[in-house]
Amino acid sequence: MKMLNYKTISALLTIFLASLVFNTSGTEKQEERQPNIIILLMDDVGYGDLGCYGHPVIKTPNMDKLADEGVRFTSFVTGAGCTPSRTQLITGRYMPRVNFGGTLDPFPGGTGKGGIPENETTLAEGLKKAGYKTGMAGKWHLGYQPGFLPVSKGFDEWFGLPYSNDFMKPWVETDEPLELYRNFDVVEYPVDQHTLTARYTTEAVRFIEKNSKSGQPFFYYLAYNMAHLPIFTTDEFRGKSKGGLYGDVMEELDWSVGQVMLALKNNGIEENTIVFLASDNGPWMDPPERMKEGGNEPWHQGTAGLLRGSKGSMYEGGGRVPAMISWPGKITSGKVTDELIGMPDIYYTLLKEAGATLPDYQLDGYNIMPFLKEIVNESPRKEYAYISGGSLRAMRMGEWKLMLTREGTAELFNLQLDPSERYNHITEKQEIARNIYSRMKKFAEELNINLDELKI
């Protein structure tokens, strides 16, 4: 065998080390690549409306698959209404912290002039500053004047409705028209709501296909109007489920989720995309009298499953919702957790994972990514405040939840043992109740909101 001389060995060693540097650099760049982000937010879908949450009739195979490929939450809580939950998601803060400067809905007697102020950093603005392309389809409900629409709040494009789909006669006595927008322009009036879910899905898929090859990370927010009353679906899904019209609507939503996931797969980006799916609040099982007209039926609403209460309620059925998150190869797959997670945590976690700069004011979320990646065993969230109408109505601390009812009484539930909130422990667990109430007093003072007296 011919021996290699010093110069040859030196040259080979140089090439070898250079290849190591090149490969390491490539690995580092791959690890540092910012993930794409998809948020799928359903409207008024209850805790018990998905197959993976126990519905015996409605079929949601795409949502179930998303849950299997990621983490499914069984104690995910958010505001018990449309705007409170969206405030938490888009600003990372409880609603009383945000000075909207007026009412957000076109109801009679309201100003309708409010919106997210300039001093708040929206999720889209934070991601945009971090280099993301941003887009949205669907319901906004955080201000409908031109300066408060999504394209004024960090989104490069938007196609959707400025508020809920019932904000028109006969359900709301308003002179403000319910119009479909593309960016700042009205593109349809009256709105054909039967095709909204399908058209929103088309927008999402187009955005994914357009931006998947650019090398620039993207964020897309698909905020469905369904299954908020009045409910609509396309001819392709009407009458096809075993769950009536509501089941048809849910199965079209599931189809939409499947189309989004297929677009990620077809464009080879599913492993570098975080997908979060949830409902904004619980089902509208006790709607006001105004919603009993125009063909709405009691069975056109979802179910909170084993949970007590519904939309607007401070019981768990109002704010505990189906929720799941997936990021293949990065977070645990096939995990179901009852650790407490709140909607503000999504804002905080996504900005953090994107390498974005967090606002320098008080946020109400936590970074749950170490928990999702199983670096730590517990969620950082240990409490959650239930706020309604400018008042602090309840607080959960650990397994216990103290609620002050509008009738002037107090209720204490152990949510670990009794998620249905059937057994009130206020009499025998007064020390626990007083400890939680003490925390509620401090929190109410911090947010400058009302807190009723604890009567035990």
Image (cartoon, rainbow, N blue to C red):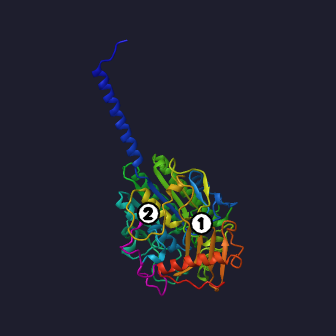
**Residue 104 painted magenta:** yes
Residue at the spot x=62%, y=73% of the render?
401
Q: Quadrant of the C terminus?
A: bottom right
Image height check: is 31 above or below 205? Answer: above
For residue 101, side relative to residue 8 (left or right): right
- The residue to which callout 2 is attached is 136
Residue at the spot x=59%, y=85% of the render?
453
Residue type highlighted by circle 1: Val
Identify the element where label 1 is drawn: loop
Q: Quadrant of the N terminus?
A: top left
Asked if residue 238 can be seen in this view, the reply is no
Q: Position of residue 132 (x, y in %)?
A: 37, 57
Q: Position of residue 412 (x, y in %)?
A: 66, 76
Image height check: is 282 above or below 31? Answer: below
Magenta-colored span: 99-123
Asked if residue 397 can be seen in this view, the reply is yes
- The residue to which callout 1 is attached is 321
Q: Position of residue 214 (x, y in %)?
A: 36, 50
